[in-house]
Amino acid sequence: MSVPETQQHSKDFCSAFAFKEIIKGRDNVVLLLGMLYFEWEKRSSTETLLFLCRRRYPTVEARAEAFNGSTHVAVPSDSDFLKAMLFELRLTEDQSFVEHRDTCTRIDHSSVRSVRVEGGDLWPVVAFQKSGLIYACLPLVEEALEPRPSLLTIPGLSQGLALLFGILDYISPSRKNEAELSAKAGQLRTLIIQACPLGTPLNTNISSLSSSFDDIQVVPTDVKQPAWRSNTYKGKPQVNVCITEKVKCMQYDKRDVVDMWQVYGAVNCKCDIEGAAPNVTLTLNLPTNGSPLQDIFVHHCVTSVDPAMLMSSSVNPLDDSVYSGPYKFPFIPPSESFNLCYYTSQVPVPPILGCYQLIEEGSQLKITVNLKLHESIKNSFEYCEARIPFFNRGPIAHLEYKVSYGQLDLSREKSLLVWVIGQKFPKSSEVSLTGTVTFGDIDEEHPTDYVCTGNTAYVKMYFRIPDFTLTGCYVDQHSVQIFAPGKPKITASRELISSDYYIWNSEASAPTMYKSLYY
C-alpha cells in the first residue's frame, strides 16, 4: 500500500553529510548543508569550510521539538554543527583532554554519537570515517529523548546508515581523482533531492540515480506500491544476493596486550521481480559451528523481523543474549540494488595469524615476518599480500631478504615492501620473510607518520577469499521465497575481504585498541 503523508513524515530525519579530505597538507572540510564559505587563520595554516548543498528538513525539526518540548536541542547553524562534529571526532588541532568527550566512562560503542552544541547534546548523530572522509546524519527519534531510548527502537538509525552507505558507495570510486570527486560532490545535491526529497529515504542507492531533474521518478500512485519501489520491472524474475564480510584485526604478539579482531558484514540484494509490491523472504543460515550475528541493522523495506534477532549485541560485554539463526527477512524489495542488512560478529580466531619483528642493528633494520593461515580458513584467495611500510626514513638503499613462499617487490618510491603471497598458502599453511634493510638520507618526498616513530611499525594484510565467509553465513537458494508469478533465477555468492588488518612490531610499542571501540 502507499505510504500516507503523515506516516511518511513519521520516518523523516534531518540529514547532514560532512566530508574531510587532506589535500597537499591542507584541511579541506566540506559540509553538505549550504552554499557558504568560511575561512579563518589557525596558527600557521588556513582551514576552509565549504558548504556545497543544504539538506535540512524544517518539518522534521519541528516534529523533533514537539516530541521533546522544553528539553529540545535545536540543530545549530551549519558552521557550528561542523565545528562541534570535528571536535567530537578529535579532528581539531587542540588535542588536550576534555572530560565530557575523553573520559573512560564515555567510550564510543558504535557509530552513534552525542555531539555537544551550544544548546545541549545532539543525539543520536550517526557518524563514521572512511578513506579520509566523514559521513554523518541526524535521525529523528519519534519519542522523548529523556531518558534516552534504546538504539534498537529507533528505525531512523538503519535508514540513515543505509543512506550514508549509499553516499559512500557513490563517492568512493572517485577518491583517487580530485576532479572527479569535485564533480560528484557538485551532483550530490540533486541526487539527495531524489533519494530523500522530504526526509524519508526513497532510494539509498545513490549511484543508480540520475543527476538530471528530468529523470526524477514520480512517487508511485499504485495503492499497493511502496514509495521506495520507484518503477515496475518487466521480464524474467531473478534475485542476486551477495554476502560481503570484512575482517578488521590488530595483532601484537605480546603477553600484556590482547589481540583484537572483528567481522562486519553486509547482505546486498538485487531483485528484478514483476509486480507493484512483490513479497520476498530471504533467510541467512549459519553452520553448526558458525559465529552468531550481532548488531543487526535492517533496510527499511523489511516488513517484519524477530525481535530476538535484533537483541544480540556486541555493545554490552555482559549481555549473554545469543541468537544463532536462522535469520529470516521478509521484505518488499526496492527496484535498485540495496543492502538488506548489516551485522557484526566476533569469530573465535582471525583468519591469518602473524608475528612481525623489527630490530635496529646499527645502520640497518632487521625484519622478520611469520604468517600462518588458520586451519579453518579456505585456502583459495583471489589475492593475498602483506605490505610493509617504512615511515620517517629515507629511501631503501639496500635490501637483502629471503622468503619461504611468494615474491617480494619494492615500491617505486622505495619506502614500501610488498610481499605477494598469491592465491594459496603452501601445504604447511605457514610462510616467512627475513631480511635486512638499509636506508638513504631522508627527504620530504618520503612518507611520514606521527604514530610509526622509532621502531613502532606494522605489516598490513590485503586479501580476498571468494565463496567464503568467516562467520560461515550463507544463503540457501532453495530457502528464498518469492510470492510473484514465474519461476525466479536465484544467484547467491559470498566473499571475505580484509579491512584495516594490522600486525604490529612486537619489539616496540604500538597503539592498542579497545574492543568496544573496534566497530
Image (spheres, grey):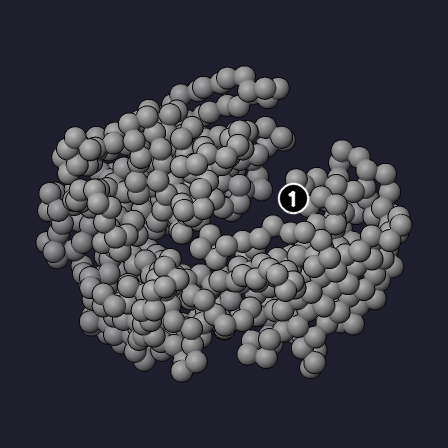
Please tell me how crowded label 1 is: few (under 14), some (14-19), or many (20+) other residues with Cα within 10 Å: few
Question: The C terminus appears in which quarter of the rendering?
Answer: bottom left
Q: In this rendering, is residue 7 above or below 319?
A: above
Image quadrant for the N terminus? bottom left
Spot occupied by residue 44 in the image (x, y as percentages of width and height): 62, 19
**Residue placed at 43% from the left, 36% from the top?**
99
Question: Which one is in front, 265 or 142?
Answer: 142
Q: Is residue 369 left or right of residue 322?
A: right
Residue 41 visible in the picture? yes
- The kind of residue tagged 1 is Val
Q: Position of residue 317 (x, y in %)?
A: 39, 62
State the residue in front, 205 or 317: 317
Q: Is residue 289 left or right of residue 24?
A: left
> Mark 1 falls on what kind of element?
loop
Q: Is residue 478 above or below residue 132?
A: below
Q: Is residue 18 left or right of residue 387?
A: left
Q: Residue at x 46, y 25 (%)?
A: 49
Indicate the quadrant where residue 372 lies.
bottom right
State whether residue 387 is above or below residue 282.
above
Residue 457: x, y in percent? 70, 51
Residue at 67% across / 41% down in the picture? 449
The answer to which quarter of the image holds residue 491 is: bottom left
In percent of the image, x 20 and y 50: which residue is there? 227
Q: Position of residue 435 (x, y in %)?
A: 83, 61
**Residue position marked by numbered label 1 in the rendering:** 451
Please name whichever residue, 125 or 222, is drawn nearer the observer in this view of the structure.
125
**Does the rendering let one see residue 239?**
no
